[in-house]
Amino acid sequence: MPDQDWLKPTVDSLARLVPHGAMVAIPAEYSGVAMELTRALIRTGVRDLHLVCVPTTGLQGEMLVGAGCVKTIETSAVTLGEYGTAVRFLDALKNGRIAIKDATCPAVHAALQAGQKGIPFMPLRGIIGSDLLEKRTDWQVIENPFAKGPDPIVLLPALNPDIAIFHAPYADADGNVFIGRRRELMTMAQAARTTLVTVEEVRDDVDLMASEETAAGALPALYVGSVAVAQRGAWPLNLWDRYAVDEAHIRQYCEMARTPDGFTRYLDDFVHPRRAAE
């Protein structure tokens, strides 16, 4: 019988594994966002997180910032798209409650790939001439040592998050997680020191490592620190083609989050329901 210890955690117990000040990698909304775990993180009162958005964030980052969980956010965008402005993020940024490390999508991916490969930096083109180089003093420009003439290139320091978190459709009984074609989730997990995953279900009828077909879309248990079942754990966001975005709820969030009091009421209604009932 396989060791079943990894099956015991709940979403709340996973959240308690995230310490104050941790660097946490979170995926873009198209990849599989652990929203139930996000709500649990807010309930723990975690503070001073450094969010690394791979490469953007939306509702997840907005809520964590609004709840006071974040000290630094590293991202190429924070947006709720057609649903509205990320008001709590903008308010925190304007009032100096968070620091931002501006990036580009390729830069975030490249820095994580360096962390994944265990190398100290990754060279990247495409940033030369942008004002990002004035803001990102941790990025360095050197001359390509293999070029015969001037050829500047940017060096990005490796990103090795303390924790990566995401939501996926299922895991098997050995702790392997199905991630399909979302290769950025593999990069996140391999670059991070540990990975916390929520899944819709644990399937006992499949061994993801048993065939080439399923293994190609699986994150091996070697890179998974802990897994918890959270049915509809990406709600109100979508999970791939498994279920759709709850558009009405996100519009409700945008309406309530326009003011600090409204955001607090949202947390009472949807994050701290027991506190709201008292």
Image: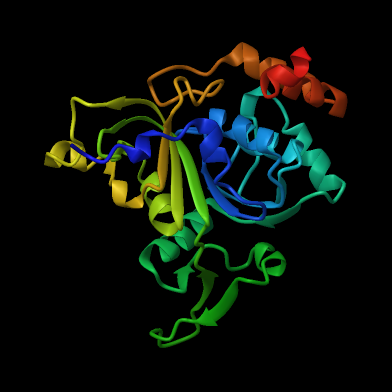
Q: Is residue 240 left or right of residue 125?
A: left
Q: Residue furthest left?
A: 211
20 or 68: nearer the viewer? 20
71 or 29: nearer the viewer? 71
Taking 83 as reference, is 228 above or below it? below
**Residue found 28% across the figure and 47% down from its top:** 220
268 or 53: nearer the viewer? 268
Displayed quadrant of residue 180: top left
The N terminus sits in image quarter: top left
Q: Position of residue 173 (x, y in %)?
A: 25, 33
Whether residue 28 is visible to the viewer of this picture, yes or no, is no
Taking 156 as reference, is 29 above or below it? above
**Residue found 47% across the figure and 55% down from its top:** 109
**Residue found 63% across the figure and 44% down from its top:** 77
135 or 210: nearer the viewer? 210
Whether residue 120 is visible to the viewer of this picture, yes or no, is yes
Displayed quadrant of residue 130: bottom right
Q: Position of residue 106 (x, y in %)?
A: 49, 55
Taking 206 as reference, is 69 above or below it? below
**Residue found 71% across the figure and 65% down from its top:** 135
Taking 90 as reference, is 191 above or below it? below
Q: Position of residue 142 (x, y in %)?
A: 54, 81
